Image (cartoon, rainbow, N blue to C red):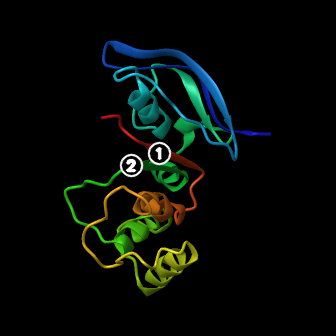
Amino acid sequence: MMSLLEVQQATVGYARRTVLRDVAFSLPAGNACCLLGANGCGKTTLMRAILGVLPLLSGEIVLAGTPLHRYSYAQRASVIAWVPQAHEGAFAFSVLDMVLMGMMPHMSTFAVPGQRERDAALQHLIAYNSTNLPLNRRRILPASPPHSRLPARCRLLSRITLLLGWKATP
């Protein structure tokens, strides 16, 4: 079975401080993986490297057979999703807004979602039995069931290859 994600002898850090050294693992397609560790051990640093927002000091990350550094920003946005445990942004987004944002990597630059995208987003919500949520409410609901799965459902619409979730420890 082909690996979806391979981290090959990755060394990651900030400026002159190495946080992780020679990390190596492989994640087969279709599997889930849980990354556990103490506060400050480098979990977030590794996630940022896998997302491609923090460059490696050495080593390589391979996604679906292609080295991550060969993906453009737009390509990465269309195949990797980061889903935080809770959305606490500065802006209030409705459920429908969140689903429409999941479609943005597949639209042209500066495009505005039209009726076709809105219809597709609504169909997506119907398919995942999410129509009981207040679609036009301007605040995303707290991260407790059943709403904790909402961000993941929203990002599914973008046809991603790798979904990274995050639950920070208190």
Reply above or below: 148 against 62. below
Examine the rendering and report whether any part of residue 111 can be seen: no
Count up the numbered dots: 2
The residue sitting at the front extreme is 145
Question: Crowding near pointer 1: few (<14 within 10 Å), some, many (20+)?
Answer: some
Q: What is the spatial separation of the Cα atoms under label 2 and label 1, in whole angstroms? A: 7 Å
Residue 129 in the image: x percent, y percent? 53, 75
**Residue 68: image x %, image y %?**
55, 37
Which quarter of the rendered picture does the C terminus lie within? top left
Q: Do the residues under discs 2 and 1 have CB atoms within 8 angstroms?
A: yes
Residue density around tag 2, few if under 14, some if 14–19, many if 20 or more, within 10 Å: some
Instruction: Describe residue 55's horizontal placement relative to residue 35 as left or right.
Output: left
- Residue 109 visible somewhere in the drawing: yes
Q: Which residue is mark 1?
A: 165
Residue at the spot x=50%, y=75% of the render? Answer: 125
Image quadrant where one finds the N terminus: top right
**Which residue is label 2 attached to?**
85
Three-letter amino acid code of the residue under disc 2: Gln
Q: Residue at x 38, y 66 (%)?
A: 98
Front residue of this view, candidates 137 and 12: 137
Q: Residue furthest right?
A: 1
**Dot 2 lies on which element?**
loop
Say left or right for 44 vs 90.
Answer: right
Looking at the picture, which amino acid does disc 1 mark?
A: Gly
Name the residue at 57% across, 31% down: 61
| Vertical arrangement, residue 29 with respect to residue 78, above or below | above
Q: Please state if 130 lies on the left or on the right of 30 as rendered.
A: left
Tell me the SS state at disc 1.
strand
Camera-side residue: 34 or 19?
34
N-terminal of the pair, mark 2 or mark 1, is: 2
Tag shown at residue 26: none
